[in-house]
Every structure is written in structure tokens, then in C-alpha cells.
């Protein structure tokens, strides 16, 4: 079905919904690379006008990826909750923006089952950064495993102690460094350099030993492929959370080696271990704009709408944590600090609106037009927006993945600047060790390195 | 010093990650803050410094030709990887046919510094010991790995080795990669190549990289293929880094 709008005397037409969404998207290099971005600033705003006049229901009636071809579309359409949608069923996308800006937390939470990713993506394209911040800040999502994540006034940190060769002592040293700086309440999660069962089991055992010997109320994860985690579970390894990278189309997920039944199988396997003490949220997902285009699996849909569709996959398997790795993919998808900033806030907004415990890996690569100042700005904006967690990497320099993320210090800054506190169980642990205010040069006895295998 | 670590700074013994940086308020002390900025500056300069082509040609002991990809400048190159893989027809028409030859393409990639520093010494170690004749070396600017397929196809080369600057990390601004492809033609996938990465003095030093490349070229000529069918089974001479 074609859409059109006349702006400044020029009539702009858009042959279908996915084209309209793509043309209405604030500029980013990935959509230009895909050949679907607006051809001019005026065409973009014309598309935004046409999108503002679009009935929300139209987004249910015209899937951007065909229902017959894509299990993510079927998941979205078949799972749509009509009664929850009722309060907004008669609105246009433009009216939906106004509804969101005026809504309270309870209204927003009740809406979630009635919202599709395409609705979240569409309205985000009409929003300024402050809209994305203001609405997300009123979306509360609380999850639990060994602690409670996402409470109001809290900011959690994933401790990311990666090492170029998966050396367990190197990982342990970075882990201890993070703990000394108050990080680790979201998860202590390692990206393995080598995705194989033996190496993953070794890291899982080491992380679990650290957690147990220091008696830390948190969870651990080795971010291996879901099939690797399944083999580790079969071997009896201590798997708290099952990790997987996911995307917004069936074809892109297949390029990651996963589909919905496999994710369901992995979740059941993790649940069967019954390792959570205060909750049963056992999944950890990562996403990022551009992954579907990168896999040549984008169906002509813009990268931000596809990113939101990945959140439909995530929410089907109640996750403890979800984060977008916003600046990792490179400048051909998000060119500079401006594009990374907008994308990070869009992803956080869409994820939160759909009910996910949304964190953001505030990050960039050295060939992107970005630097530490851009990261400080996005980090601060996300803090105001109520981001669930951010990454903590020693000195912001991931020596295995070769990109810059946020540091343990960055997270401390954000907590300090905005008066945010760690997850309550973890906060109590920090106070017990004496790490709640400063970092002592001489290591506390309770955190003796020898306890976790760090001998001279 | 011996005994169990007891101070924060002792953690530095176990990893090259930026641990035990200290803490002032919630921030980094000035010295580690500026050390980070210096590392980022080196990486940025590696990405944006143009390849000094005459200097590279002078450093080579072999005849060379120069081509440019379809990406006109660095900004376009970074945003449009497809253009960095494309060889304009006018460029292809200038290249000589060298059927049966081994072709080396030197590409700036994401770190011209890496190519500037390491490509000539690597070639000097490899060229005299090749099991097949060498085509003139091609220097390609604003190039991606797959540009070598187009150049190799235009020259009808038997195989191409693309020496290209890798994406700089904070402490690795001059890392060279080498991608070997049998019977190059447009449309080859990464699964049809063999890769040697992290070639630099503190990574895989040039003498070892040269031995590995010569081993791969020999195996490629025997098997008449590259990629997943050609496993790197070179006997290990030194422990892995």
C-alpha cells in the first residue's frame, strides 16, 4: 500500500510500509549502505509526516518481513495481545508519541503485550533524544537471578574481564579489579576468545569459583554460542546464564546459528539447573543495529526497525539482561558519535518500552568517528534515561575484542553523578567488604587474590 | 617479588588489560587518562594517515604498479566497504596479464602504517623463495581484502596474497594481515581464503610470518585450493604468543 506526503509543495510517495519506515529514519550510514535511506533531508521529514499520520494498527496489518517467510514475524503477530493494545488501538503513530510522553509508569507497563517492535521503532523515528530519554525513564523492568536488577534508582554493571587467550589468571585479575571498583552486579561475563566446549567449561568453573569464594551475590556467564553452553550444561558445568547474540529476522538469526526452538531448548536446560536464588531469569541476549544487513538478511528494512524486532525474540525468553552493543559494528553502520548516540538511545527506548531489562554497551571502534567525549555524553544520557546496566571493562580498553567500551570508573562516575546505587544485594556485599566508598590499595582480606588462584 | 599478591597493582602481573589504574574520586588519575588518549591517537592516526606510495615503492625490491579502489576518499571508504572492494574498469585495463603467477597486493586497509612498516620486509623475505613466478607487486589505495580478487582476476593470477592494514586496536596500531586466495575472482568468500593476522614485531614477527606464508603457499600449490580445505598444519616452531 503506498503512502504519501506533500512538503513545501513537493509530493513524496513511499511504495510500502518498510520503505516509509526506512525513509523516516534519522540518517545513519547503514541505511545508506543498504540503499534505503531518504534521498534528502526534506524527503526524510516528509516520510516522518506520513508516518505520524499512519494508524498504529496498520503496523500489525502490513508486516515489514513477510509472515510466511519469517518466524520472527510470526512470533510478533501471533503473540500480539489485542486487549492490551486496546487503549492505543485507534491512535496514529504521531498520536502514540503524545500518548507516551504523557503516560505514567503503570500505563506504560500495562501496554507492553499490546506493543509490537514495529510500533516502538515507528514512534521512535518521530522522537527527539529527550523524548527517548523521558519515556524510557518511566519504563521500569525488574529481573532476578541471584540479585535484583532494574529497581528504581539503581545502576548495575556487567564486569567484562576479557583476555586475548582466555588465560584464567588474566580473567581473574581483571575480575578482581572490577570488583574493587564496584562492578559486577549485572553479571560477571567473559567473551571467550575461542568458542569451544573445553575452554568455556574452564572459564565457567573459574568464574563460579570466584563468585563462591568471595560469596558475591551475582551471576556469571561465558558468552559462548548457545550450542556451546548446551554442551557445557550436559557436562555438568556451572552455567548461570545462557548467552546468545540475536537479530530481528529469521535469516539473520540463522546466520548466527540459532532459531527460536534452539533458544527455547537452551532456556529449559538452564532452568533445569535451578541455580538462581531469588529468581529464574536465565537468559542473556546481545543485539546491535546493522547485524541483519551484515548477514545480508535485512529484507529491505531499516536497521533500527530490525533491531527492535530482535527485542521480540528476546522477550519471548524472559531474559535477566539484554544489551545492544551499539558502536561495535563499525562506521559503515553507525558512522560517528552522533549516529552512535542516537542509536543507543533508540535501542534503549525500544527495549524498555517492550519490557526488556535493557543495558547498553556504550562503545566505539578506532575507525569510527568517535572518542571518549562521545561515550561520556551517551553514558550520561543513558543514565538519565534509567539504563539498567552498562559494561565495565578495565580502563575502557577491551584487549580481546579490540574496541573501547565503558570502564569501571565510568560506571562509578555515573552512579556518583546521578545518585544511583548498585543492585541491593550487591550493594550490601560491597559494604561488607568495605568497598562502598573507595578502593583500598592493599587488598581486603576477604578478596585475597590467592582465593581465586592468583599466586605469585 | 614473590609471595601472594596483596596490593592492587600486583594484578598487573597477570594481564595486559588496563587494571589497577588507581582512582581519584570516581575517575582515572591523569597519567592513565593521558596514556589512553595517546593510544587512541595512535590508532586514529593509523586509520587516517594516507599511504606514502612513493616511499613504499622505493622500499620494495620488486617492480610495482599502483591502483585505486572505487572509494574516492577515506570517509567514503569507511562508510562504503563495497566501494573499497571494487576495482574501476579503467584501473583494471592498466594491469598486465600474468597467468600462472603469484600476485602480491599491498593495501592500506584500516592501517596504512602497518603496510608502510611491515609489507616491504615481509615481501623481501618471501619473494626469493616462491615456488611460482611473481607478478609485479600491486599497491592499492582505499582497498579492502576482496579488492585483491578483482585485481587478481584482471591479471589472471594463479593466486593472490593481500597484505593489508588491520583495524587498529588501542595498543596495536600497526598490525598487518595477510589473506591468501587461490585463483582469485570477484565473488570469492572469506571461507575461500587463508589468513595470517597480527603481523607486527610484538605480535607475529615478520620472520615467522614469512615462514607461515611460504608454508601456506606451498600447501596451496600442492592442493590447488585455499580456504577451509587448507588447514594450517605448519609444525609449530615457537610457542603461541
Image (spheres, rainbow, N blue to C red):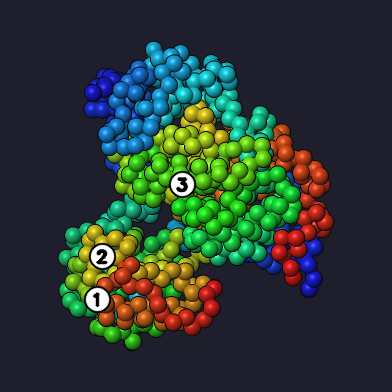
Circles 2 and 3 in contact, beta carbons < 8 Å: no
Q: Residue at x 19, y 78 (%)?
A: B100
Name the foreground residue: B42 vs A13.
A13
Question: What residue would you read off at disc 3?
Answer: A245
Q: Quadrant of the C terminus of chain A?
A: bottom right
Q: Earlier in the sequence, mark 1 or mark 2?
A: 2
Res B224 label: 1
Q: Residue at x 68, y 60 (%)?
A: A173
Res B149 label: 2
Q: Chain of mark 3?
A: A
Q: CA distance from mark 1 to mark 3?
A: 36 Å
Whether A133 is drawn above or below B67: the answer is above
Crowd class of label 3 (few under 14; some 14 to 19; many from 20; radius 10 Å)? many
Callouts 1 and 2 on one subunit: yes
Name the foreground residue: B193 vs A256.
A256
Q: Residue at x 45, y 52 (%)?
A: A227
Name the foreground residue: B25 vs B56.
B25
Crowd class of label 1 (few under 14; some 14 to 19; many from 20; radius 10 Å)? some
Where does the image place residue B72, in percent across and percent down from the top left?
Answer: 31, 54
Where does the image place residue A136, in percent across and percent down from the top left?
Answer: 55, 28
Where does the image place residue B119, in percent across and percent down from the top left?
Answer: 40, 74
Q: CA distance from mark 1 to mark 2?
A: 16 Å
Where does the image place residue B75, in percent across and percent down from the top left?
Answer: 38, 51
Q: Chain of mark 2?
A: B
Q: Quadrant of the N terminus of chain A?
A: top left
Amino acid at each position: 500500500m503506498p503512502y504519501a506526503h506533500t512538503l513545501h509543495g513537493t509530493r513524496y510517495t513511499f511504495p510500502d510500509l518498510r520503505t516509509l519506515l526506512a525513509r523516516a529514519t534519522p540518517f545513519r550510514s547503514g541505511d545508506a549502505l543498504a540503499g534505503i535511506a531518504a534521498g534528502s533531508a526534506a524527503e526524510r521529514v516528509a516520510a516522518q509526516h506520513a508516518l505520524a499520520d499512519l494508524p498504529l494498527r496498520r503496523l500489525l496489518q502490513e508486516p515489514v518481513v513477510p509472515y510466511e517467510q519469517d518466524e520472527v514475524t510470526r512470533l510478533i503477530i501471533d503473540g500480539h495481545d489485542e486487549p492490551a493494545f486496546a487503549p492505543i488501538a485507534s491512535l496514529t503513530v504521531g498520536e502514540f508519541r503524545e500518548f507516551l510522553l504523557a503516560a505514567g509508569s503503570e500505563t506504560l507497563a500495562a501496554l507492553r503485550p499490546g506493543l509490537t517492535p514495529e510500533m516502538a521503532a515507528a514512534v521512535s523515528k518521530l522522537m527527539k533524544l529527550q523524548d527517548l530519554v523521558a519515556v524510557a525513564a518511566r519504563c521500569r523492568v525488574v529481573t532476578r537471578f541471584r540479585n535484583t536488577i532494574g529497581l528504581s534508582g539503581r545502576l548495575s554493571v556487567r564486569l567484562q574481564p576479557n583476555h586475548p587467550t582466555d588465560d584464567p589468571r588474566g580473567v581473574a585479575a581483571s575480575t578482581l579489579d572490577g570488583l574493587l571498583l564496584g562492578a559486577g552486579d549485572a553479571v560477571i561475563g567473559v567473551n571467550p576468545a575461542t568458542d569451544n566446549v573445553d575452554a568455556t567449561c574452564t572459564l565457567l568453573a573459574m568464574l563460579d569459583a570466584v563468585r563462591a569464594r568471595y560469596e558475591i551475590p551475582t551471576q556469571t556467564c561465558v558468552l559462548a554460542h548457545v550450542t556451546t553452553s548446551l554442551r557445557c550444561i550436559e557436562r555438568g558445568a556451572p552455567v548461570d546464564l545462557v548467552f546468545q547474540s540475536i537479530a530481528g529476522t529469521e535469516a539473520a538469526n540463522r546466520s548466527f546459528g540459532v532459531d527460536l526452538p534452539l533458544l527455547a531448548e537452551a532456556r529449559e536446560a538452564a532452568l533445569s539447573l535451578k541455580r538462581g536464588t531469588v529468581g529464574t531469569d536465565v537468559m542473556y541476549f546481545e543485539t546491535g543495529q546493522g547485524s541483519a544487513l551484515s548477514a545480508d538478511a535485512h529484507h529491505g528494512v531499516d536497521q533500527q526497525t530490525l533491531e527492535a524486532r530482535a527485542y521480540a525474540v528476546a522477550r519471548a525468553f524472559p531474559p535477566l539482561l539484554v544489551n545492544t552493543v551499539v558502536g561495535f559494528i563499525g562506521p559503515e553502520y553507525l558512522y560517528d558519535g552522533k549516529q552512535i548516540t542516537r542509536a543507543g538511545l533508540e535501542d534503549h527506548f525500544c527495549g524498555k518500552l517492550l519490557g526488556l531489562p535493557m543495558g547498553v554497551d556504550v562503545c566505539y571502534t578506532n575507525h569510527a568517528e568517535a572518542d571518549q567525549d562521545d561515550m561520556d555524553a551517551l553514558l550520561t544520557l543513558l543514565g538519565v534515561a534509567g539504563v539498567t546496566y552498562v559494561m565495565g571493562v578495565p580502563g575502557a580498553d577491551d584487549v580481546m575484542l579490540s574496541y573501547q567500551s565503558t570502564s569501571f570508573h565510568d560506571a562509578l562516575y555515573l552512579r556518583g553523578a546521578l545518585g544511583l546505587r548498585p543492585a541491593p544485594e550487591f550493594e550490601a556485599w560491597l559494604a561488607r567488604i568495605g568497598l562502598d566508598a573507595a578502593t583500598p590499595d592493599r587488598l581486603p582480606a576477604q578478596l585475597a587474590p590467592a582465593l581465586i588462584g592468583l599466586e605469585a | 617479588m614473590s609471595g601472594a599478591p596483596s596490593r592492587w597493582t600486583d594484578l598487573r602481573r597477570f594481564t595486559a588489560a588496563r587494571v589497577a589504574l588507581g582512582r581519584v574520586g570516581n575517575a582515572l588519575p591523569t597519567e592513565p587518562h593521558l596514556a589512553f588518549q595517546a593510544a587512541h591517537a595512535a590508532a586514529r592516526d593509523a586509520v587516517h594517515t594516507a599511504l606514502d606510495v612513493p616511499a613504499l615503492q622505493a622500499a620494495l625490491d620488486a617492480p610495482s604498479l599502483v591502483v585505486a579502489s572505487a572509494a574516492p576518499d577515506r570517509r567514503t571508504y569507511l562508510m562504503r566497504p563495497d566501494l573499497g572492494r571494487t576495482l574501476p574498469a579503467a584501473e583494471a585495463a592498466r594491469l598486465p596479464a600474468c597467468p600462472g603467477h603469484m600476485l602480491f597486493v599491498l593495501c592500506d586497509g584500516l592501517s596504512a602504517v602497518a603496510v608502510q612498516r611491515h609489507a616491504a620486509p615481509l615481501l623481501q623475505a618471501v619473494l626469493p623463495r616462491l615456488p611460482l613466478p611473481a607478478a609485479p607487486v600491486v599497491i592499492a589505495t582505499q582497498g579492502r581484502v576482496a579488492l585483491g580478487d578483482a585485481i587478481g582476476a584482471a591479471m589472471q593470477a594463479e593466486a593472490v596474497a593481500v597484505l593489508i592494514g588491520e583495524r587498529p586496536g588501542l595498543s596495536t596500531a600497526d598490525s598487518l594481515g595477510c589473506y591468501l586466495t587461490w585463483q582469485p575472482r570477484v565473488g570469492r568468500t572469506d571461507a575461500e581464503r587463508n589468513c595470517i593476522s597480527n603481523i607486527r614485531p610484538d605480535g607475529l614477527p615478520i620472520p615467522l610470518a614469512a615462514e607461515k606464508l611460504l608454508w601456506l603457499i606451498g600447501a596451496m600449490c600442492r592442493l590447488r585450493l585455499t580456504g577451509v580445505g587448507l588447514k594450517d598444519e605448519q609444525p609449530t616452531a615457537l610457542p603461541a604468543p
